Structure formats: C-alpha cells, structure tokens
Image (spheres, helix red, strand yellow):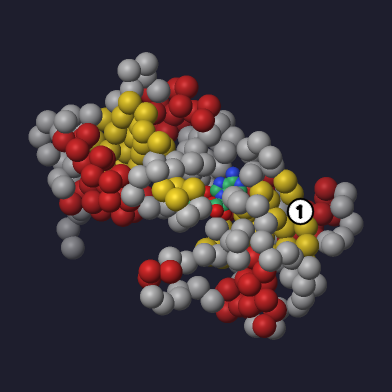
Amino acid sequence: MGRTSAAASSGGAGSVYIIGAGPGDPELITVKALRLLGEADVVLYDRLVPRELLGSVKPNARLIYVGKEPGRAAMSQEEINRVLVEEAKRGMVVARLHGGDPFVFGRGFEECSYVVSHGIKCEVVPGVTSAIAAPEKYMIPPVLRGVASSFAVITGKEDPNKGRRFVDPGKVASAVDTLIVLMGAGTIGDVARNIMGAGVRPDTPVAVIINAYRPGEEFRVYTLSTVPERVDNPAVIVIGEVVKKALALLGHDTAR
Ligand code: SAH
C-alpha cells in the first residue's frame, strides 16, 4: 500500500474538524482544539461540551446544539452528517465539538467517514476522555504498578438496534484488572451482577463519578454487591482494586 492521506479535499470547499472538548473542565481542552474553535464559522456541539468554551468562538460564528439527551436527540446523526457536509461545501470551516474524545463512544468516526466520502477535508483533534479524566480527578489510576497492569473501557448500554451484543462485562472484567464503564448509569446493577456471575469477587470496589468537572458532581464508592440498580447520568464507573488505593490516598477507609 502506498502512502495515504487522512484527509480528502476538494477545491474551494471548507473543512471539517472533529474535535474533542475534554471531560467538562473548560481548561482540559487542547491548545489546538481551542485555536480551531476560534477559527470556525460553524460550531456543532454536544450535550457534555462545557458551555464556557462557546465563548471562544468568533462573534459571527453559527452555533448549533446537537446534543443527545438520554432517549432524546436534538438532531439525528444523519442530520448532523448532512449539516457538516453542507456547511463545508459552502466554504465554511466547521468544528464539530464532542465531549471527551471524539472517537471514544462518540460518533466522530462515522462523521469523518461521511465527510471524507463527500470529498471534504476532515481532521480529528483528540480530546481528554472522561473515561480517564473523571477517575483521575479522584486519584484513581487505571493502572498501577503491583496492583493493575491492564484496563478496558466498555459501554454499559449498547445500541438495541444493533441486534447482537458485543460487550460481555463479566468476560472483560475477568480479563483485565480495571474496568471502566461509560454510559452505564442506567444499567450498573445489571453490569455488576453480570461481573459477579463471571466469578469476580463481590467485594471488588466500584467508584462512580457523576457529572465530573460539572455542576452536581458526585463521587460515590460501593462494592459489586452493594451498587444500586442505577445512578444519575452522566457517570463514569470504575471497577477494580485501584479504587482502594485512591480511597487510601483520599483518606476514605473502605467502600460501602
Ligand atoms: N466521548 C466521550 C464519551 C461519550 S459517551 C468521552 O470521551 O468522554 C457519554 C458517556 O461519557 C456518559 O454516559 C458518561 O459515561 C461519560 N461522561 C462523559 N462526560 C462525563 C462527565 N463529565 N462526568 C461523568 N461522566 C461523563
């Protein structure tokens, strides 16, 4: 195979940037993302994008909210794709801002594919994912020498239209030291049962970080056997012994 360019381009058209906005703290965005935000003519932003960042756009930039609340979307994915392409074809610089990292359970890749398939230049700007940042705010390391040497990030909620299940939380939890669950606020009880059913100890600690870096932030600690059926959304859930190390550092003794 020869050299390939990550971006396709067409004469006169604008470009699309698929950008990670970080986990919620407006300072946890990259320098590059912030610069591009200031250059964009059109900005499409998600529910979990820190609103303070929208203060960095040009005075005449068009802001479009495309957030997906649980069970309800401001704009369908097809519409988002269409707007990205239409605006770029009009010569606009388009910034599509995702919470966290655009390719970690975002639809960034699909957007990029659609844009590139229409001959428009697309660039991905990585972001700090909540999967790592939210635990780290509470000193929880995904890996730690002598305690955990692997971690996995899974979704707690799969697309029911997909027809088959890709993630078996019990299997993953048995294979890695630390399991991080996104989109699991509504299914945490099921996920915990599944994991215990796979033979993981019921007293394994579980940390739940709700609204990390956002108003209403909460940090809760349980064990696999004491987690409630559901917690508030959005939440990052961390399952594994590394949670105990963080608790010791933070001055909490044990999980409830
Ligand atoms: N691309 C995002 C994840 C999108 S999926 C990223 O890399 O962070 C949305 C899920 O991310 C939520 O259901 C929740 O599990 C998690 N999430 C994102 N931001 C969060 C925050 N500030 N606090 C807690 N969970 C968050």
Q: Is 18 placed above or below 178 here?
A: above
In this orientation, which residue lies closer to the viewer: 30 or 180? 180
The residue lying toward the viewer, choosing from 178 and 236, is 236
Query: From the viewer's perspective, is residue 47 above or below residue 193?
Result: above
Q: Is mark 1 within 8 Å of ligand 1?
A: no
Question: Is residue 133 among what the camera can see?
Answer: no
The mark total stands at 1
Using the image as rendered, state which of residue 211 and residue 14 is in the foreground. 211
The local secondary structure at tag 1 comes to strand
Question: Residue 91: where, in percent of width, then height?
Answer: 18, 29
Q: Position of residue 108 (x, y in %)?
A: 36, 50
Residue 54 image offset from top left, x and y in percent: 46, 27
Of all residues, the one furthest to the left in this rendering is 11
Quarter holding the C terminus? bottom right
Residue extending farthest to the front is: 72
The quarter of the displayed image where residue 64 is located: top left
Residue ranking furthest to the top: 59
Residue at image position (25%, 53%) is: 113
6 lies above or below 176: above
- Residue for badge 1: 220
Q: Residues within 10 Å of mark 1 (few under 14, many from 20)?
A: some
Q: Is residue 125 left or right of residue 139?
A: left
Query: Which image quadrant for residue 90?
Result: top left
Q: Is residue 79 visible in the rendered structure shown here? A: yes
- Point 78% across, 57% down: residue: 221
Horizontal and vertical percent for residue 58? 37, 19
Residue located 56% across and 58% down the image: 182
Q: Residue at x 66, y 61 (%)?
A: 230
Vertical comparison of 27 with 159: above or below: above
Q: Is residue 38 left or right of residue 24?
A: left
User: Given the image, on which type of amino acid does mark 1 rest?
Assistant: Arg
